[in-house]
Image (cartoon, rainbow, N blue to C red):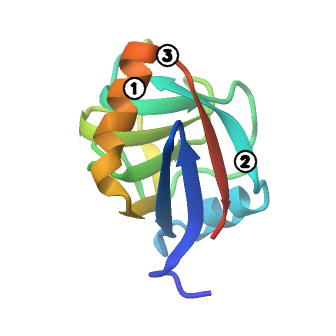
Protein backbone atom coordinates (compact mmCIF):
# COMPACT_ATOMS: atom_id res chain seq x y z
CA UNK A 1 0.00 0.00 0.00
CA UNK A 2 1.60 3.29 -1.13
CA UNK A 3 1.52 6.15 1.37
CA UNK A 4 0.80 8.74 -1.32
CA UNK A 5 -2.26 7.03 -2.72
CA UNK A 6 -5.79 7.43 -1.42
CA UNK A 7 -6.17 4.76 1.20
CA UNK A 8 -9.34 5.82 2.95
CA UNK A 9 -12.75 6.91 1.81
CA UNK A 10 -14.47 9.49 3.97
CA UNK A 11 -18.22 9.89 3.66
CA UNK A 12 -19.52 12.86 5.64
CA UNK A 13 -23.05 14.14 5.25
CA UNK A 14 -23.82 13.94 1.49
CA UNK A 15 -20.14 14.23 0.47
CA UNK A 16 -17.47 11.65 -0.35
CA UNK A 17 -13.73 12.30 -0.11
CA UNK A 18 -10.59 10.26 -0.80
CA UNK A 19 -7.97 10.50 1.94
CA UNK A 20 -4.23 9.82 1.69
CA UNK A 21 -2.53 8.59 4.83
CA UNK A 22 0.50 10.53 6.04
CA UNK A 23 3.83 8.69 6.19
CA UNK A 24 4.94 11.06 8.97
CA UNK A 25 2.31 9.55 11.32
CA UNK A 26 2.69 5.76 10.90
CA UNK A 27 1.54 4.79 14.42
CA UNK A 28 -1.57 6.97 14.22
CA UNK A 29 -2.40 5.65 10.73
CA UNK A 30 -2.02 2.04 11.88
CA UNK A 31 -4.17 2.62 14.99
CA UNK A 32 -6.89 4.29 12.93
CA UNK A 33 -6.87 1.60 10.21
CA UNK A 34 -7.41 -1.05 12.91
CA UNK A 35 -10.75 0.61 13.74
CA UNK A 36 -12.14 0.69 10.18
CA UNK A 37 -14.89 1.08 9.29
CA UNK A 38 -15.15 4.02 11.67
CA UNK A 39 -18.66 5.43 12.03
CA UNK A 40 -19.76 8.42 14.07
CA UNK A 41 -21.11 11.94 13.65
CA UNK A 42 -19.28 15.20 13.11
CA UNK A 43 -20.30 18.59 14.42
CA UNK A 44 -18.91 22.08 13.88
CA UNK A 45 -16.04 23.03 16.19
CA UNK A 46 -16.67 25.46 19.03
CA UNK A 47 -13.24 27.01 19.69
CA UNK A 48 -11.00 26.11 16.75
CA UNK A 49 -12.33 28.13 13.80
CA UNK A 50 -13.37 26.51 10.52
CA UNK A 51 -13.45 22.75 11.08
CA UNK A 52 -15.69 19.87 11.98
CA UNK A 53 -14.85 17.48 14.77
CA UNK A 54 -15.79 14.06 16.04
CA UNK A 55 -15.81 13.94 19.85
CA UNK A 56 -14.56 10.54 21.03
CA UNK A 57 -14.59 10.85 24.82
CA UNK A 58 -12.04 8.57 26.44
CA UNK A 59 -11.46 6.34 23.38
CA UNK A 60 -7.78 5.35 23.51
CA UNK A 61 -5.99 4.85 20.19
CA UNK A 62 -2.79 3.91 22.05
CA UNK A 63 -0.70 6.61 20.36
CA UNK A 64 1.08 9.72 21.54
CA UNK A 65 2.03 12.80 19.55
CA UNK A 66 3.50 12.36 16.07
CA UNK A 67 3.37 14.80 13.15
CA UNK A 68 1.24 17.04 15.38
CA UNK A 69 0.04 20.55 14.63
CA UNK A 70 -2.28 23.21 16.01
CA UNK A 71 -2.74 24.85 12.60
CA UNK A 72 -4.00 22.29 10.05
CA UNK A 73 -4.63 23.36 6.47
CA UNK A 74 -8.00 22.77 4.79
CA UNK A 75 -8.45 19.06 4.11
CA UNK A 76 -6.04 17.92 6.79
CA UNK A 77 -7.37 15.40 9.31
CA UNK A 78 -6.05 15.31 12.87
CA UNK A 79 -6.38 12.82 15.70
CA UNK A 80 -6.02 14.35 19.13
CA UNK A 81 -5.04 11.34 21.27
CA UNK A 82 -6.47 12.76 24.49
CA UNK A 83 -4.82 14.28 27.51
CA UNK A 84 -5.96 17.73 28.62
CA UNK A 85 -9.14 17.35 26.55
CA UNK A 86 -11.11 14.41 25.21
CA UNK A 87 -9.95 12.28 22.29
CA UNK A 88 -11.22 13.69 19.00
CA UNK A 89 -10.87 13.86 15.25
CA UNK A 90 -10.70 17.26 13.56
CA UNK A 91 -11.14 17.99 9.85
CA UNK A 92 -10.15 21.50 8.81
CA UNK A 93 -12.03 23.34 6.06
CA UNK A 94 -10.62 26.84 6.58
CA UNK A 95 -8.57 28.77 9.11
CA UNK A 96 -7.99 26.69 12.25
CA UNK A 97 -6.22 27.29 15.55
CA UNK A 98 -6.92 23.92 17.21
CA UNK A 99 -8.16 24.46 20.76
CA UNK A 100 -10.61 23.37 23.44
CA UNK A 101 -12.03 25.02 26.52
CA UNK A 102 -8.77 23.91 28.18
CA UNK A 103 -6.65 25.92 25.69
CA UNK A 104 -4.55 25.21 22.62
CA UNK A 105 -4.29 21.60 21.43
CA UNK A 106 -2.11 19.81 18.89
CA UNK A 107 -3.38 16.83 16.95
CA UNK A 108 -1.64 14.17 14.87
CA UNK A 109 -1.96 15.00 11.17
CA UNK A 110 -2.52 11.50 9.83
CA UNK A 111 -4.67 12.04 6.73
CA UNK A 112 -5.16 14.55 3.94
CA UNK A 113 -8.15 14.81 1.61
CA UNK A 114 -6.89 14.31 -1.95
CA UNK A 115 -10.19 14.35 -3.86
CA UNK A 116 -13.46 16.08 -3.15
CA UNK A 117 -11.73 18.99 -1.41
CA UNK A 118 -14.15 21.41 -3.12
CA UNK A 119 -16.85 19.95 -0.84
CA UNK A 120 -15.04 20.39 2.47
CA UNK A 121 -16.31 23.96 2.99
CA UNK A 122 -19.90 22.98 2.12
CA UNK A 123 -19.60 20.15 4.69
CA UNK A 124 -18.40 22.60 7.33
CA UNK A 125 -21.22 25.03 6.61
CA UNK A 126 -23.76 22.19 6.60
CA UNK A 127 -22.60 21.09 10.07
CA UNK A 128 -22.59 24.70 11.27
CA UNK A 129 -26.12 25.53 10.11
CA UNK A 130 -27.89 22.15 10.12
CA UNK A 131 -26.13 20.26 12.92
CA UNK A 132 -24.49 16.86 13.29
CA UNK A 133 -23.69 14.92 10.12
CA UNK A 134 -23.07 11.20 9.83
CA UNK A 135 -19.42 10.40 9.13
CA UNK A 136 -17.80 7.18 7.98
CA UNK A 137 -14.18 6.30 7.31
CA UNK A 138 -13.58 3.08 5.35
CA UNK A 139 -10.82 1.44 3.32
CA UNK A 140 -10.64 2.82 -0.22
Inspect this view and state whether residue 61 appears. no
Q: Which residue is mark 2?
A: 38
Distance (Cα) linking label 2 and label 3: 20 Å
User: Outermost residue, front direction?
Assistant: 14
Q: Residue at x 53, y 36 (%)?
A: 13
Say which label, 2 or 1, has the lower sequence index.
Answer: 2
Q: Residues within 10 Å of mark 1 (few under 14, many from 20)?
A: some
Q: Which residue is mark 1?
A: 126
Q: Which residue is mark 3?
A: 131
- Please name whichever residue, 134 or 90, is drawn nearer the observer in this view of the structure: 134
Q: Secondary structure at mark 1?
A: helix
Dot 2 and dot 1 residues touching (CB under 8 Å): no
Viewed as shown, does residue 31 lie left or right of 109? Answer: right
For residue 3, the mark is none
Distance (Cα) linking label 2 and label 1: 21 Å
Say which label, 2 or 3, has the lower sequence index.
Answer: 2
Vertical placement of residue 4 versus 104, above or below: below
Q: Residues within 10 Å of mark 3 (few under 14, many from 20)?
A: few
Dot 1 and dot 3 residues touching (CB under 8 Å): no
Q: Residue at x 49, y 16 (%)?
A: 131
Viewed as shown, does residue 39 lie left or right of 64? Answer: right
Image position, residue 121 (x, y; %): 29, 38
Image position, residue 12 (x, y; %): 54, 41
Quarter of the image for residue 105 reads: top left
Quarter of the image for residue 91 reads: top left
Q: Nearer the viewer, mark 2 or mark 1?
A: 1
Q: Residue at x 40, y 60 (%)?
A: 113
Vertical placement of residue 37 versus 52, above or below: below
Amino acid sequence: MGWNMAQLRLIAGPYTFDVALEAAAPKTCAAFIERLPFLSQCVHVRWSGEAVWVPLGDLDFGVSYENHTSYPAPGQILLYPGGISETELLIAYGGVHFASKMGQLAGNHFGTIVSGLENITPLGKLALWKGAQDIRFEAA
